[in-house]
Amino acid sequence: METVHLTRGAHRFKIGGGGGIRALRAEYLTGRSGTFIFGGVDQLGVADGAFAQTVGRPPLARFTGVEAGGFVQDRWHVAPGVSLLLGLRVDWEKVPTDKILPDSAWLARTALRTDTLQGTRMKWGPRAGFTWDVANRQRWFVQGGGGVYHGVVDGSAFGEGIATASGVEGRRGVGVLGRWPLPPDSTVAPVQGPRFAVVHPAVSAPRTSRATFGVSGILGGGAVLHLSMSYRHTDFLVRRHDLNLLPVPTARDQYGRPVYGTLVQSGAALTAAPGSNRRFSGFDAVTALDQDGYSDYVGFTAHVERRVGRGLTLSTGYTYSRTEDNWLGARGIPEQQVTPFPDSLGGRDWADGRSDFDVPHRFAFGAELDFGSVRLAGFYGYRSGDPFTPGFRDGVDANADGSWRNDPAYVDDQVPGVPDLFSAWPCLREQVGRFADRNSCRGPTVQRLDLRLALGPFRLGYPIEVTVDALNVLDAEYADVDRALYLVDPAGSLTTDPASGVLTVPLVANPGFGRVIRRFGSGRALRLGIRVNYE
């Protein structure tokens, strides 16, 4: 983006503009290789389980988007030590409207079009801010600002709409699958019908409204203090809704959970009978890629830096933040992104709650010791663990909506073994007698330590510095935890009360709830560097 700077008295203008072409090509579609679910070793031995696969023409999404925009900004020095910033950015984006083909069969059955798109978008982004040098003494500064910022249309969602509109079908099977690990034949797992994604007609780019405020100043003893607060609201995030799910549940389980199809138990697995949860027969999952997702973030940060003596510098910082959204499964696969309660829960959208990205506490401490030709430095970081929802193991579709990993658990202290978990997991005790809130529990914290030894500079024609970095000394790892509060009891069986129609699922408490089942991280590393400073 090219810019021009102009100065007129107390005003400094900046004007710029530019454009670009964004080309996307994607050949991936979830489920192409097929997914098996087995409810235990015995079921695996006889290949008794469930299978799902996406078949049809190889998925290919290829499209080109065009972007152009410009901005104007004025930094106005109102008075000594005080300046205001006012600006406006305007962007234009165009996506092709002819890449998503219409589905005539779906239109005939539902009167819903799949190819009605608005191809162009104008995006307006006003900005404002200020800085204040208190008393114009270069010791304390106050600053703040806010504005509206736009991204670009979600290429993965738009690409999915293109790829699935070209003849993609879903096939599913439940029972003895036969040739595992090879995919079962079409007799065992028949094609259920087309499956595709419907892009929202008013497809738009994510929009973020952001505001910040901060104070910085010099304390006694030469310490520097920084305090800041920020707020961010993002909307037009893509969420998934299954248009082909039955509009009303066919049953309720013992906790009142809506069940949208016929549940089939195989050991500790629980799946929906193929086609039993579909509103329109002859079609598999039909996913609406709506843009009703949002994210709210608020954070407070305090940072102090001080030089102690002649060679020691210390710095420490802490951030408290909260992130809430309705953006299910943002870090997961598509089937995790469908809400388990399409008709709300207790009059509210169960998806509204703690975000998958919520990290309330972050702490950092750094130190550097300078001996002249030798410098030692270290950094320690700590953060809260990732949140998770008490639920079931993968392979349990408690509400028969077709997703094997999106159902929360109902916290029942009458199930033997559940109260034994309360001391280690207070998040469970707080929710007794109701379905667990989204991301109401949290995994292990993450700590990291990095160290550096720097030697030099030495003069070999030019100043040269040698650095040795020990990264991730504590071997910090991220962890997947066992989120299953219950296991389906393989010794029990599904029962239905003929009078009330209530479906009872045999459950047992999982004593391993919250335990780490998989660790992943970058590992420890030793890095050698040489830096040459050309004069």
Image (cartoon, rainbow, N blue to C red):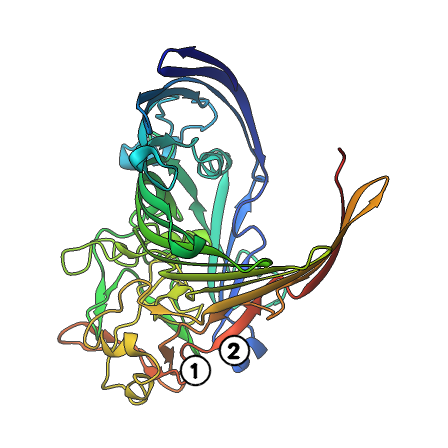
Picture layout, residue 127 above or below residue 289: above
Q: Which residue is drawn at 29% across and 49% down?
A: 279
Residue at 30%, 64% (x, y): give it: 399
Amino acid carrying label 1: it is Gly
Left or right of 270: which side holds 18? right
Give the class, few, some or many, for how many residues have Cα within 10 Å of label 1's Cα (few <14, many ≥20). Answer: some
Residue assigned mark 1: 512
Frontmost of labels 2 and 1 is 1
Q: Is there any visible trace of residue 175 in the rendered image?
A: no
* Front residue of 118 and 352: 352
Residue 157's image quarter? top left
Say left or right for 444 vs 244.
right
Which one is earlier in the sequence, the residue at label 2 or at label 1?
Answer: 2
Name which residue type carries label 2: Gln
Q: Residue 43 carries which label?
A: 2
Tag 2: Cα neighbours inside 10 Å, few (<14), some, or many (≥20)? some
Name above or below for residue 89 compared with residue 417: above
- The one nearer the camera, 264 or 67, is 67
